[in-house]
Amino acid sequence: FGWKDQGLHSLLASMGIAPETARWLAAGALALLLLGFVFADKRFRANPTQWLAGLALGALVVGGWYVSGHLGFGENPETLETGYFGTNTRTLESLSFVAPLAYGLELLMLWTDKSLHLSFGIASAAGVALGSAAWALATRSFRWEGFGNVEDTANHLVGATLMGIGGVTAMGCTVGQGLTGISTLAIGSFVALAGIVGGAAATLKYITWRAEREA
């Protein structure tokens, strides 16, 4: 449509609203809608752990933009090139897991390749795993889990394959698109998130229907 980007604020700006006003209007309206949705649930309101965790996750997304876009921006002393040097994409990044896991695997496989390095995405993905393990050990909630039977194993393998394909084709997962992408007001992220939520809901309905039928 001739927009310079796919942001929700660009849609409002195309209707004649000033660009800066459109940005604040889109962000403010979205924030109010989300706050109204989550706090409408009584159990959520009564559980400070959940909404404090939500605030922390939101702050981490913002922090990711700051780290990769501000601290990671500089000049290469060898080429004198100015750019974003803390990310694999050489541009701003925040929390995501699909691409960073692939970049991390590539780094482990080709460790001696001097062109590869530990990036923001790889470090954040590894940090989630290590941080979760540390918290589980510290709170003595760590436990080993496995698959119930062959069918359970097969379901997880099929689900993992579909998630991998979906994450690549959608250019992000529930974090990359659902949190980081939405924070940019990208319309494509809203479409991806709707597909993720819709697919999850449909699958849960199918599992429930199948269990009731077998019972």
Image (tube, helix red, strand yellow):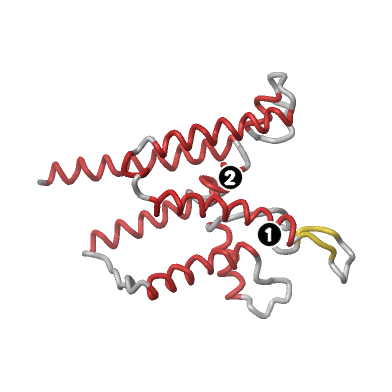
Q: Residue 181, which numbered label?
A: 2
Q: Quadrant of residue 26?
A: top right
Identify residue type, mark 1: Val
* Foreground of the two, 141 or 88: 141
Q: Quadrant of residue 96?
A: bottom right
Residue 158: percent from left, percent from top: 35, 55
* Foreground of the two, 65 or 14: 65
Residue 193: percent from left, percent from top: 48, 41
Residue at (48% x, 69% y) in the render: 131
Instruction: Please report whichever mark, 2 or 1, sits nearer to the chain's N-terminal start.
Output: 1
Question: Badge 1: how crowded within 10 Å, few (<14), some, or many (20+)?
Answer: some
Foreground: disc 2 or disc 1: 1
Identify residue type, mark 2: Gly
Give the residue furthest to the bottom. Answer: 112
Residue 52: percent from left, percent from top: 45, 52
Q: Quadrant of residue 139?
A: bottom left
Q: Quadrant of the N terminus?
A: top right
177 versus 107 height, above or below = above
Give the residue furthest to the top. Answer: 16
* Spatial CA span between label 2 and label 1: 16 Å
Q: Secondary structure at mark 2?
A: helix
Return the residue at label 1. 67
14 versus 42 height, above or below = above
Q: Secondary structure at mark 1?
A: helix
Q: Is 187 left, or right, of 38 in this rendering?
A: right
Residue 163: percent from left, percent from top: 44, 52
